[in-house]
Amino acid sequence: MASGDDGNKKLQLYSYWRSSCSHRVRIGLNFKGLEYEYKAVNVLKREQHTPEFKKLNPIGYVPVLVDGDVVLSDSFAILMYLEEKYPQHPLLPSDLKKKAINYQAANIVSSSIQPHQNLAGVKYAEEKISADECFSWVKFHIGNGFAALEELLKDYAGKYATGDDVYLADLFLAPQIYAAIKRFNLDMSKYPLLLRLHGAYSELPAFQNAMPEKQPDAPSS
Ligand SMILES: N[C@@H](CCC(=O)N[C@@H](CS)C(=O)NCC(=O)O)C(=O)O
């Protein structure tokens, strides 16, 4: 694996094992063959709100990538930065339409699904409504997004979301499908294309090594 190209300074990723946003970036780093130092941030212990961490990301979310003097947060921005700085194994196709579909699919996940399951929102909602109602609300939004993704990708999908190569959309889809299955117990029979993609991702080392349970801060059992 290559490290960042700024001398011998290794890239650093501030991540939480179960964070789907961190998971996207882990796949991107692995896919591009970039070695990085894993810096665990336990969001359940509110480590994302420490003054130290907030110097890196004032909004108090993981992931954060440090590449020499570049400190970046937000998985989309991080992946676009990696794409330009480390062009090997491109995350975007050259075809403009396909590229736009990748942006659209990635943003359905990051703007229209994930925010509904984010810790801060879920904790707040659980105080206002019951935990069960909150869980159903989150599942509703995952299902809504998944239905849109099935429709969007049906004319583009090959082995992966937009053809036979892995691109940006796949980096956003894999963690969201994983979370839907493992954390939210979503009935995936309604989303056959996404279920098939989930199987395809599970065969790729870049995706396997980014799995939550393989991270150094994952609980041992
Ligand atoms: N749009 C941001 C969202 C970041 C985000 O929501 N991170 C979550 C984990 S996936 C987080 O740090 N949550 C902690 C909290 O809610 O306090 C991204 O894509 O990186």
Image: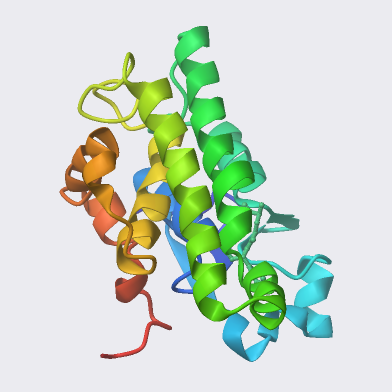
Q: Is residue 11 visible to the viewer in this orientation of the structure? A: yes
Q: Position of residue 7 (x, y in %)?
A: 58, 56
Residue 153 position by quadrant: top left
Q: Position of residue 12 (x, y in %)?
A: 57, 66
The colour scheme of the drawn protein is rainbow
Question: Which image quadrant: the N terminus?
Answer: bottom left
Question: Considering only vertical position in the picture, is 149 above or below 122?
Answer: above
Nearer the observer, 196 or 125? 125
Residue 178 position by quadrant: bottom left
Nearer the observer, 216 or 193? 193
Nearer the observer, 24 or 131? 131
Question: Considering only vertical position in the picture, is 155 above or below 44?
Answer: above
Q: Residue at x 72, y 77 (%)?
A: 128
Q: Residue at x 60, y 50 (%)?
A: 75
Q: Is residue 88 visible to the viewer in this orientation of the structure? A: no
Question: Considering only vertical position in the picture, is 16 above or below 32?
Answer: below
Residue 137 position by quadrant: bottom right
Nearer the observer, 2 or 190? 190
Q: Position of residue 186 (x, y in %)?
A: 33, 57
Q: Position of residue 36 (x, y in %)?
A: 47, 63
54 relative to 213 in the view: left or right? right
124 relative to 29 in the view: left or right? right
Question: Which image quadrant: the C terminus?
Answer: bottom left
**Ligand 1 appears in which quadrant?**
bottom right
Q: Residue at x 49, y 40 (%)?
A: 145
Question: Considering only vertical position in the picture, is 31 above or below 122?
Answer: above
